Amino acid sequence: MLKWLLVIGIIWFVYNYYIKKKTLTPKNKNQDLEDNDMVQCSTCKIYVEINEAIVSNGSYYCSKECLRSAK
């Protein structure tokens, strides 16, 4: 009986750690962005090219004013 509980516990751990965790990770955060891709400003919600955007703490901003107002 103890062997079966141990096997069930290992299967439960593998399921929760490997399979269930993969479905909870956000997919759009790990995208590789190119120079001409558009990103949304975290403050005013307009779109700006990624090579013109200001990045701070993982968020994109269209101008220094939006960056200041976010802080």
Image: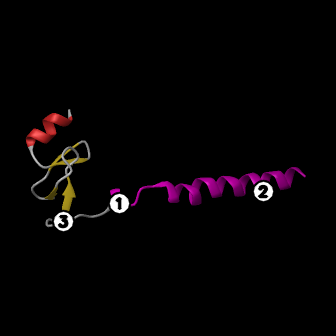
Earlier sequence position, callout 3 versus callout 1: 1
User: Alpha-carbon distance for marks 2 and 3?
Assistant: 48 Å
Q: Quadrant of residue 49?
A: bottom left
Callout 3–callout 1 Cβ contact below 8 Å: no
Disc 3 marks which residue? 37
Amino acid type, label 2: Val
Q: Is residue 56 left or right of residue 25?
A: left
| Cα gap from disc 2 to disc 1, whole angstroms | 36 Å
Q: Which residues are magenta?
A: 1-30
Residue under the image location 54 percent in, 55 percent down: 21
- Amino acid type of the residue tagged 3 in the rendering: Asp
Give the numbered dot on residue 7.
2
Q: Label 1 belongs to which residue?
A: 28
Mark 2 vs mark 3: in front? 3
Residue found 59% across the figure and 53% down from its top: 17
Q: Are marks 2 and 3 in contact (CB under 8 Å)?
A: no
Q: Is residue 7 magenta?
A: yes
In what element is the residue under mark 3? loop
